[in-house]
Amino acid sequence: MGDQPDEIRLKPTKDGSFIRPDSAFRSFVSKDPDSQFPAEKDRYVLYLSPGCPWSHRAMIVRSLKKLENIIDLYICSLTMGKDGWFFDDSPEAAKYGVLPKDPLYGLDTLKQLYLKANPNYEGRYTVPVLWDKKTHAMVSNESSDIIRMLYTEFDHLLPDEDREINRPGGGFYPDGLRENIDEINEWVYHTVNNGVYKSGFAMTQAAYEENVEKVFKSLDRLERILDEGPFLLGKHITEADIRLFPTILRFDVGYVPIFMCNLGTIRDHYPNLHLWLRRLYWDNSYRTHGAFRKTSETWLEKYKTGYANARRRILGITGPDIVPKGPLVLIHELEEGERL
């Protein structure tokens, strides 16, 4: 990179803490045919990187909702280059579904797509991105908005049995549980989903210790919640489970060794969370159609490579990426009697 500053490197804050910037594109796809972005088959595409947990939640919902033939998926690099996420024509990248170039415009980086959407854009070039191929516009780069669009707005294009109103429990974000889901999402986001990043990207010892303790206090809280049922809000999978899954899947393989979230592991210290994780991952029933495993298995071994690269780049650490060897088992199988 020579003397050029690394665009990925974090700008230090006064107390050494990591602050995630807000998403800049927040429009919404709607089932209303007269809306700015009406839900139509083959009109939209998700740009994402499977190693990124925010991307992963969008991949999961696209698969849970059986939208693979309605919304395209363009996979970017598994690590960030000098301009962020990029397309990669190497044989190694092809093994993981990474595209050699952007299929729509022949672009090399996601940064170029952001600048196509807004030539004056100056924020970070994050994934996932929901793109409108018809109007050549970026609809959203906020994963929490994208997954809610996918729950309901394309339902008129699906068979009756796959529509939210007919799902067990009333769907992934049912009216009667929305307040509960939002409440869980709020503290889980700050102290778990983003808490691991606040720990791993901390620039002072105090900031690291403060945030890693919050991570494990919240894991303790989640463990107690799962005393009551197989999922976070009872018998059915909800958005709260979907948003937590990518973080817990990455915890032992990435966040423990690389982000130093090492006060415990899911597999050794949180039996309820470990069972919850494995039940979702290995499920092939009507509940998930294998969505959690399908969107994870190919890339699970590469999560730690992405985090080793990201931590070095973001903190400005010099030298090569050193990737931890373990764990020997990436995810344990279910034992007799553990399946739902």
Image (cartoon, rainbow, N blue to C red):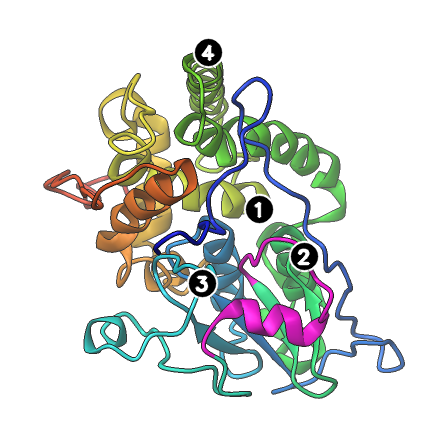
Q: Nearer the viewer, residue 67 or 308?
A: 308
Q: Nearer the viewer, residue 122 or 20?
A: 122
Quick check: 91 above or below 305? below
- Magenta segment: does it hold 120? yes
Contact? badges 3 and 1 (CB < 8 Å): no
Q: Report the side of 71 relative to 73 (left or right).
A: right
Q: Amino acid at mark 4?
A: Ala
Pair 1/4: label in front: 4
Residue at label 3? Answer: 85
Counting the numbered discs, the total is: 4
Numbered tag placed on residue 206 in the rendering: 4
* Residue at left offset 79%, top offset 76%: 37
Residue at label 1? Answer: 238
**Dot 1 surroundings within 10 Å: few (below 14), some, or many (20 or more)?**
many
How far apart are the alpha carbons under marks 1 and 4?
A: 35 Å
* Image location (x, y in percent) of residue 129: 59, 65
Mark 4 or mark 3, earlier in chain: 3
How far apart are the alpha carbons under marks 2 and 1?
A: 35 Å
Q: Amino acid at mark 1?
A: Thr
Q: Which residues are magenta?
A: 108-128
Q: Amino acid at mark 3?
A: Trp
* Image location (x, y in percent) of residue 111: 55, 67
How far apart are the alpha carbons under marks 3 and 1?
A: 30 Å
* Image location (x, y in percent) of residue 4: 44, 54
Q: Report the side of 12 relative to 279 (left or right).
A: right
Secondary structure of the residue carrying tag 1 is loop
Quick check: 218 above or below 165? above
Residue at label 2? Answer: 122
- Magenta segment: does it hold 218? no
